[in-house]
Image: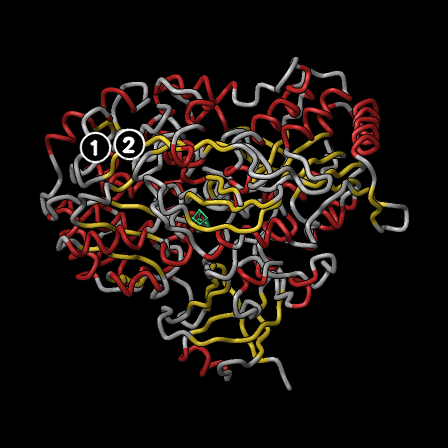
Amino acid sequence: MKEVSTFCRICEPSCGLIAEVEDGELVGVRPDAEHPVTKGFACNKGLAGLDLHRDPDRLDHPLRRRADGRFEAISWEVAIREIAERIREVQSRHGTKAFASYIGNPSAFNALAGPAMGSFLGQLGVRKNFSSGTQDCANKFAGAEAVYGTSTCHPIPDFEHTDFLLVLGSNPQVSRMSFVSISDPMAAMRGIRSRGGRVVYVGPRTIESARRGEMFLVQPGTDVYLLAAMIEEILASGRVDEAVVAAHAAGFDGLAEIVRAYPAERVASVVGTSAEAIRQLARDFADAPSASATLSTGVNMGRQGTTAYWLMQMLVFLTGNLDRRGGNLYGRGFYPAAPRSGRTDPSKHFFDSEWGRIRKIRGSLPGNLMADAIRSEADPIRALFVVCGNPVLSVGGEAAMREALEALELLVVVDLYPNATAEHADYVLPAADGFERADLNLCGLGLQARPFVQVCGPVVEPRADRKPEWWIFGRLEQALGLDSVLDADGAPPLFGRLDHMLRATGHTAAEIAKAPSGTIVLPSLEPGRFYDDVIQTEDGRVACDPPVFHAEGAIERMETIFESLADEPGERLKLISKREPSMHNSWLQNLPKVRGRHREPRMWLHPEDASRIGVGEGDRVRARNAYGEIEVAVALDPGLAKGVVAMPHGGGFSGSPALRFAAARPGENVNRLLPHGPGSFEPLSGQAFMTGIPVEVEPVAG
Ligand code: SF4
């Protein structure tokens, strides 16, 4: 048996794995105990890699939809030729403006897929691009761009030295972390506490992670007011680091004026806590010898994720904790992305559209507008490429999305699975999985607590007709007469761009692949260069009061939303998104090893809310609002803030018989309760509203 070093391609830590190979077949996957950074850590999802690779329901051959709606297997030669012909037809009838793409979250863990898609779409001239980024993190790009002048600058907590870690909207024990790449985050939390430090989690549910920390319960969507009040308290009590502000702040007075409108006494009832608790949290953060902060999807997916991210940065900056040991540090990694990408002027990304004023964020339009853009009267999308994405289940408004996809003249889906989106495709193309393709752990760039680069080749040859994305798009490019990576004599230069980036550290991908575990460890995060080398604002200062927030109405909206929250009836229920270890968005649902106890997603209610509604554990309820309705079983959770109901995203497989295990336990697609279309996303970032959604819950009779 051969053992091959590789790494997990599911989430940000990129945990090192050992693949066991016998006679050219993958036969086992285990954590890489010798990995210099991840040191033998891997979770249930990564260790289910063998099952993912062998799943009999995976796509193994290109499929073509027949006139009767069923799919038939075809050869790659036929698939490439026919898709190219269909592209030419759409192009000649409607022009390139009729094309669009949607790229899903797994592309972030596939260093060669993004450039392959970029090359193909760029040469075709496709400008209408959507991505799952506007479902979970677009606010962070917009916030970093406004505050630091570039969307690639996200200082992360210095876990090894911090005395106080504030974690908003994140449950690292269950879902690891996002925009922070750290294997075994709970070990880091234990480390902070064992040094006498504090870890405070902020959110609307007492989360599993808080068993080793403190929970600060808030109402959904109110983090922005909590942060504003904390800053107001820090200003009012003279806890600002004046020297840092004098040296590095721009717009400090403007920020001070904004937060003055949100003192703890005013926001407390909306946030769902006491004014004293908010003031104490602010003072504790500011008085800690060092303090750091991070926030994740629980905040991102609210109505004001960008402004919340801005205020979190301000909390760290004003207390002197930005670029300080134990505070938040910029991670250079193997390539200094922030300084190299240069300054972006956020105001240039906004434009007027038929759905109102919108923006592109790192090239992506709001995913919540994709169905509308397909059905646009003025300028409809006629051909769509979906790569490792599942907008039918990931975006709000499933019915509208399904209807829109049926209106397309050409839908091509590239995926591991025949997912819900693929049910509407004309062609479904089988992608190689992480054991079948070469890769580099690009996703953690700038975000790794312990920076490292790992390079691996394919562990085994792709099964059946599966192919990596660079091959699929390279072949389509050739069929369309475009430049292709496959045109090169000999081996295709797959790592060209990555090798160029690696030059900043004096390495090459080929050389790293030969290192033990295919990994080199990079210098640790160090403070001291942020203000000189990293920040990209025009004046080199931290933008405390970003002009784009005023120009695009965000500050005014902050007040309007606050007033509407303050006026809400007390008994209103709000739906939040919940993560579970047995779920991973919508793409691991066919794996028994991940689904664990095989339970369908339930809706969690606070026992008092359940009793008021007249239901108990296991009863079925109907949850509905203006956007849709679902029926689901109840689970009780006294750790929820009252008035909050929680449900994980990723269910809804009743119409997906090709995924046999998932279809037998289909669950409900909670995203049917989410808004979609114009007005359903944060204007500053295009980030969809996906949490804190008002919902009515009633018992299902019988
Ligand atoms: S934590 Fe993420 S990267 Fe690590 S094994 Fe689990 S899914 Fe894979």
Q: Which residue occupies 31% across, 46% down?
A: 294
Q: Which residue occupies 61% across, 80% down?
A: 700
Q: Does label 1 or label 2 sit earlier along the sequence?
A: 1
* Alpha carbon distance from label 1 to label 2: 7 Å
Mark 1 residue crowding within 10 angstroms, few (<14) / some (14–19) / many (20+): many
Measuring from the top left, give residue 501's x and y in whole percent: 43, 20
Measuring from the top left, give residue 128's x and y in whole percent: 64, 30
Disc number for residue 330 = 2
**Residue that label 1 marks:** 323
* Residue 152 in sight: yes
* Residue 559 in sight: no
Query: Looking at the image, which is closer to me, 487 or 267?
Result: 487
Q: Which residue occupies 71% across, 36% down?
A: 384
Q: Residue furthest top?
A: 489
Q: Is residue 151 left or right of residue 294?
A: right
For the residues labelled 1 and 2, say whether their Cβ atoms are less than 8 Å apart: yes
Up/down of 217 relative to 7, above or below: below
Figure quadrant of the C terminus = bottom right
The amino acid on which the numbered mark 1 sits, given as a three-letter code, is Asp
Up/down of 347 relative to 195, above or below: above
What is the total number of numbered labels drawn onto the structure image?
2
Query: Looking at the image, which is closer to me, 97 or 583?
Result: 583
Measuring from the top left, give residue 641's x and y in whole percent: 36, 68
Mark 2 residue crowding within 10 angstroms, few (<14) / some (14–19) / many (20+): many
User: SS for tag 2?
Assistant: loop
Query: Looking at the image, which is closer to me, 83 or 1?
Result: 1
The amino acid on which the numbered mark 2 sits, given as a three-letter code, is Tyr
